[in-house]
Image (tube, rainbow, N blue to C red):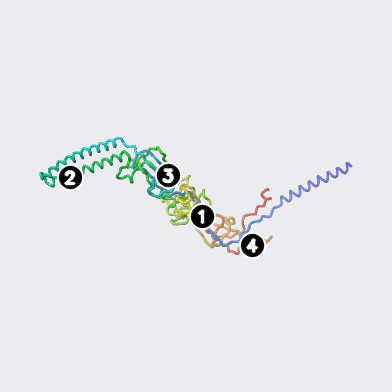
Amino acid sequence: MKKYSKLIIAAIIALIFIGTFVFLWQKSQPKEVVYNEFTPTTENIQKTTIITGKIEPRNEVNIKPQISGIIQELYKEPGDYINAGDVIAKVKVVPEMGQLSNAEMRVKLAEINLKQAETNFQREENLYSQKLVSADEFDKIKVALEQAKHEKVAAEDALQVVRDGFSKSNAKASSTLIRSTISGVILDIPVKVGYSVIQVNTMNEGTTIASVANMNNLIFRGNIDETEVGQLVNGMPMKITIGALQDLKFDAALEYISPKAVESNGANQFEIKAAVNVPADSAGGKSGHLRSGYSANAEIVLSRAEKVLSIPESAIEFSGDSTFVYVVKGEGKNKTYDRTYIETGLSDGVNIEIKKGITAKDKVRGPEIITDDDKKD
């Protein structure tokens, strides 16, 4: 029994040894290298670039008061669509004491002058009726009375404007009612009821009551690298994709290229602007799809080649300024690869244009085919 057991163990060891030897021998044998092969095809190739930026109104107007005071009422909210002339807010005037005092003094002087003019008119009228003064003298006194009356009305209007912000004679044009100067969407109202506001004048910019913009007239603003800006010309078409609205794309036309670069992250960038074609059902005033400041990407075709012979760029060998491909010759075990000089053209990053060197009847070698076993090795 012991003799048979020893023979069995020896046989198992021998099998393991032989199996290991065969496995190592197989692993040491060179594997056949298999390559992808491509046949040139006729394609349309275009080189595009993506420009990041944002969407904003072409014209954004800040509505400011013509009088200083305190916000008494707000009639609109951000996002509301308004027409030119619509009232946004009402300002309660806080009169400046010096101006108020002067206006009150002017009214008192006007009243005194009017009383004196009335007295002079009555006296002159009696003398004129008795033919003791000439008609010219009487007319002068009559004119002076009319002037005194107008001065009193003007003084009272001025006092009311200083005190209340409007007068009876111009109540419809009251400067206490802040009206929009354009039709559009209210983007922002940075004030609240009770806020103090300052009128716009030559000394300061005044307080912004609201920002209003026409959301039907939008532009794309972004920056392009100096290596690509030379390929741009005004009027080039663009496709705009809004980051927050992936389902919506808009056509645009390039209308501005900055003549001066700005440095950004160590690279020179040039600002560009493009007019966005906004459909009526996407405008802010209609459906509210678009909002000022949305991040956006603009795709622009820098160059295009139509119906040209092309192959995958992965099949190209670059050597200095020259390019080569390996043309397949023969089949099966007799297959060889002939290194051939070619002249290339436009590339889109995947396919490349072939101008000279091979034809549509040729077949070229591509990258080596990597199997799962090769990855494990």
Query: Which amino acid type corresponds to the residue marked 3 in the rendered image?
Result: Lys
Q: Which numbered disc flags the more N-terminal residue, 1 or 4?
A: 1
Instruction: Using the image as rendered, state which of residue 260 and residue 187 is in the foreground.
Output: 187
Instruction: Using the image as rendered, state which of residue 319 and residue 307 is in the foreground.
Output: 307
**Spatial separation of the CA atoms under disc 3 and disc 4:** 78 Å
| Residue that badge 4 annotates | 329
* Residue at point 55%, 58% (across, down): 352
Residue 261 shows in the view: no
Quadrant of the rendering where the N terminus is positioned: top right
Q: Which numbered disc flags the more N-terminal residue, 3 or 4?
A: 3
| Residue that badge 1 annotates | 48
**Spatial separation of the CA atoms under disc 3 and disc 2:** 52 Å
| Residue that badge 3 annotates | 76
Q: Quadrant of residue 38?
A: bottom right
* Left or right for 89, reference 345: left
Q: Which numbered disc flags the more N-terminal residue, 3 or 2?
A: 3
| Residue that badge 2 annotates | 142
Query: Which amino acid type corresponds to the residue marked 4 in the rendered image?
Result: Lys
